[in-house]
Image (spheres, rainbow, N blue to C red):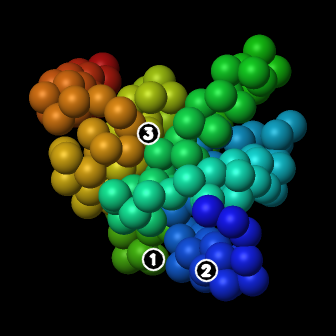
Amino acid sequence: MVRTTENDTQFMEMIRQNEGVIYKVTSFYTDADHPIGDLYQEVVLNLWKAFPSFRGESKYSTWIYRIALNTCVSFYRRNKKNMAYVDIAVDVPEEVENNEQIQELYKLINRLGKIERALVLLYLDDKSYKEIAEITGLSVTNVATKLSRIKDKLKQMSNE
C-alpha cells in the first residue's frame, strides 16, 4: 500500500476511534519512570509502520490490541529491571469505584504476571475467546485454559 492523504486520514480516524484501547493497554505497562505518553507514542508509531500492511482480515480493534500488546510486552521486557509495581488504570464507573470487592479484584489482578494481566484485560473488555486468541496469537483452547487457570489463581489469592 502506497501512503496517500486518504490513508493518512483513515489512519488518524482509526487512532481516534480506538484511542481508549491504546491507553488501556499501555496503562498496564507503565510506571512513574516510564510515562504512559512515551509508550503510547511507541504503540502509535508501530501502528503507523504496520498500517500499510493491514489486510483487513480482522477488525481494527483486534489488530490494534495485538500490536499494542506486542509493543508493550517488548517495552516491558527491555525495561523490566527498572520497572516498579504497576497499578492498573481502568476507567470504572463511580458507583463501582467505591465497591470494595471490585477494588480488591483490581489489587489481585495487579499481582498477576504481564501476560496474565493482558488476558484478563481482554476478558474484562468482553472479548470472546476467539478474539483474544486472534489478538494474542494463542489458540482458542490455550486462551480458555489460561483464563481458567487465572480465575483459579485469583480465587486462591483472594482466599489468602
Tell me the quadrant of the picture where the N terminus can be found. bottom right
Q: Position of residue 133 (x, y in %)?
A: 27, 39
Residue for badge 2 = 10
SS at circle 2:
helix
Residue 21 is marked as none
Alpha carbon distance from label 1 to label 3: 24 Å
SS at circle 3:
helix
Query: How crowded is the residue under tag 2: few (<14 C-alpha within 10 Å), some, or many (20+)?
Result: few
Which is more N-terminal, label 1 or label 2? 2
SS at circle 1:
helix
- For the point 13% across and 29% down, the residue is 141
- For the point 52% across and 63% down, the residue is 21
Which is more N-terminal, label 3 or label 2? 2
Eyeballing the image, is 42 above or below 137? below
- For the point 34% across and 59% down, the residue is 58
**Residue type, mark 2 in image:** Gln
Q: Position of residue 65 (x, y in %)?
A: 47, 52
**Residue type, mark 3 in image:** Ala
- For the point 35% across and 33% down, the residue is 137
| 154 to the left or right of 52 | left
Q: Check whether the beta carbons of the residues at disc 1 and disc 3 lie within 8 A of each other.
A: no
Residue for badge 1 = 94
Alpha carbon distance from label 2 to label 3: 27 Å
Q: Seen from this angle, which residue lies furthest top?
A: 81
Along the line of sight, the residue nearer the viewer: 110 or 144: 144
Q: Position of residue 109 (x, y in %)?
A: 41, 37
Residue for badge 3 = 118
Which is more N-terminal, label 3 or label 1? 1
- Examine the rendering and report whether any part of residue 103 can be seen: no
Q: Position of residue 110 (x, y in %)?
A: 49, 35
Q: Nearer the viewer, mark 2 or mark 1?
A: 2
- Examine the rendering and report whether any part of residue 93 can be seen: yes
